Image: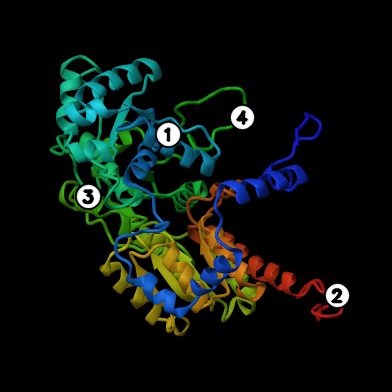
């Protein structure tokens, strides 16, 4: 049972050793009062039926794995995208430890976020003193140029006023009067991480531009603003900058964490690296227009851009897949007068060639998918372009307007006619659907692993393999560096999808002289 430096085992083979098997069996038999195995199997089988699905979909007071995270998580990511900014969460230490850990496991990077550690006293008397002490210590220790403040449930339940608390902290000298401190109220018990990102971005825009609009003129700087929204694929920030550079378009990514979340291991620790500068956000109202790359997740941002910056905030879809990327680039060309260069036309042609190469393996394949509103809509649109069939779409943090727009996308293709859309439902609902309306694959984040495991538990013929796309991805490495937007992102998604289909085919045709009908290696 003991391990040595020469024989260190991870948990999978370690707990398979006889000593551990005996220990765990004894624990189960003598301390856990276990339910009879036959009864467990009977209940499991019942949870895979239509009868159980009906009960499951009628539940009201319980959520099981909601396929979303809470608002302050999104606020932290938004703040990380601005130069020399320290995300500061007004709330309990445990909540902020969760945010740091969640991002750390996804990005495999240290995540700088501080908390003012509210406890029972603050819950009774308010968190003003926590904020004063926390801001003073954070600025003294970490020397940021911006502190971005968000909240957790505790602060929101007791009604702490961030504007007043920050103002009082400056008045009392906890931080300098001129230190920018954008803020957003981000209660975790409503909305999701996409709303938190949206709220914090509005906080930045308000902080840096609301009271300095007199000398601003739309179009005077000749730039385009791009607002990414809650974006965790670092390649997407880079592909946007590359495409704009190839077009000769001067574009500003408003919130760009691609450097601070992907710093090199060269012996130097970078607490602050890259990001949108204060000058860039201050200059943003002078742009020709601001394009929202995840429009369904940015209602507050859209309202501010249209109402305060007086820009049209031209509507686009998330540029995922062939047609959506075409529309995005043509809209940028229309706004700026810049032609789409041959390099991007060539890249588009390569994507079309890949689609022609792979469509026979994807045609007719059924996919269940879940995730955030813009991501799911973009991915479903691309699946339809490939001839695949999105048979189940689940989006916990969408609204009825999104549902109608999603249905319109499905109705425009013969491959979308049999798709079910489920809004506000969770992954336990999706589990029922995978048993009663089995697709070929499920596409989503790492939590889909439990769905695949449960379907496999019923039998190999019921298994629904997981294709990992979305956030978070904990159980695979380096996928956060990939790209899902533009032609480049479509190529990467297509490569992932078709190779998962082929891998499943391999898995089903491995039995010698029984299922290995094809003897060629290239099908």
* Spatial separation of the CA atoms under disc 3 and disc 1: 33 Å
**Which residue is rendered at x = 19% and y = 29% of the image?**
124
Q: Nearer the viewer, mark 4 or mark 3?
A: 4
Q: Which circle's residue, 1 or 2, is located before the other in the chain? A: 1
Residue 522: image location, x then y, percent:
78, 72
Q: Which residue is mark 4?
A: 265
The quarter in which the C terminus is drawn is: bottom right
Distance from label 2 to label 3 (Cα)?
A: 62 Å
- Image-based side of 8 in relation to 384, left or right: right
Q: x, y (%) of residue 123?
A: 22, 31
Q: Secondary structure at mark 4?
A: loop
Instruction: State the separation of the CA atoms marked 4 and 3.
Output: 38 Å
Q: Residues within 10 Å of mark 4 (few under 14, many from 20)?
A: few
Q: What residue is pinned by disc 1?
A: 97
Residue at the limit of the structure toward the right, as seen here: 513
Q: Nearer the viewer, residue 348 or 37?
A: 37
Residue at label 3? 305
- Of mark 3 and mark 1, the one earlier in the sequence is 1
């Amino acid at each position: 049972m003991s391990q040595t430096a020469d024989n260190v085992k991870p948990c999978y083979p370690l707990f398979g050793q006889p000593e551990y098997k005996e220990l765990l069996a004894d624990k189960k038999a003598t301390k856990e009062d276990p339910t009879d195995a036959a009864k467990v199997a009977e209940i499991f089988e019942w949870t895979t039926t239509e009868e159980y699905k009906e009960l499951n979909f009628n539940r009201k007071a319980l959520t099981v794995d909601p396929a979303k995270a809470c608002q302050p998580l999104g606020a932290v990511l938004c703040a990380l995208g601005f130069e020399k900014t320290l995300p500061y969460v007004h709330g309990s230490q445990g909540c902020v430890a969760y945010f740091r850990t969640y991002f750390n496991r996804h990005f495999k990077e240290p995540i700088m976020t501080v908390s003012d550690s509210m406890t029972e006293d603050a819950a009774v008397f308010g968190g003003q003193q926590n904020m004063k002490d926390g801001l003073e210590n954070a600025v003294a220790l970490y020397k940021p140029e911006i502190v971005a403040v968000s909240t957790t449930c505790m602060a929101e339940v007791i009604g702490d006023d961030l504007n007043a608390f920050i103002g009082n902290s400056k008045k009392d000298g906890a931080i300098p009067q001129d230190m920018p401190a954008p803020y957003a109220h981000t209660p975790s018990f409503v909305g999701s991480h996409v709303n938190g990102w949206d709220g914090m971005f509005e906080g930045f825009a308000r902080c840096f531009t609301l009271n300095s609009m007199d000398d601003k003129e739309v179009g005077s700087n000749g730039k385009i603003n791009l607002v990414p929204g809650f974006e965790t694929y670092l390649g997407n920030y880079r592909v946007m900058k590359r495409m704009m550079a190839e077009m000769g378009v001067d574009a500003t990514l408003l919130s760009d964490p691609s450097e601070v979340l992907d710093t090199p291991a060269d012996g130097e620790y970078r607490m602050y690296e890259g990001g949108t500068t204060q000058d860039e956000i201050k200059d943003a109202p002078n742009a020709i227009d601001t394009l929202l790359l995840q429009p369904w997740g940015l209602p507050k941002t859209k309202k501010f851009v249209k109402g305060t910056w007086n820009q049209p905030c031209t509507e686009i879809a998330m540029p995922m897949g062939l047609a959506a990327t075409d529309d995005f680039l043509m809209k940028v060309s229309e706004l700026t007068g810049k032609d789409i260069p041959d390099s991007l036309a060539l890249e588009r042609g390569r994507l079309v060639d890949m689609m022609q190469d792979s469509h026979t393996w994807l045609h007719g394949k059924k996919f269940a998918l879940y995730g955030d509103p813009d991501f799911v809509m973009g991915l479903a649109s691309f699946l339809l372009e490939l001839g695949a069939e999105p048979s189940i779409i689940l989006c916990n943090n969408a609204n009825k307007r999104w549902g109608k727009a999603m249905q319109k996308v499905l109705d425009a293709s013969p491959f979308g006619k049999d798709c079910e859309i489920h809004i506000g439902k969770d992954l336990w609902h999706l589990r029922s659907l995978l048993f009663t309306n089995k697709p070929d694959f499920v596409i989503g984040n790492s939590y889909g692993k439990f769905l695949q495991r449960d379907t496999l538990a019923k039998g190999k013929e019921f298994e629904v393999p997981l294709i990992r796309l979305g956030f978070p991805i904990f159980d695979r490495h380096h996928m956060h560096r990939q790209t899902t937007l533009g032609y480049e992102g479509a190529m990467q998604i297509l490569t992932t999808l078709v190779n998962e289909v082929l891998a499943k085919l391999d898995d089903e045709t491995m039995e010698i002289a029984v299922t290995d009908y094809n003897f060629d290696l290239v099908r």
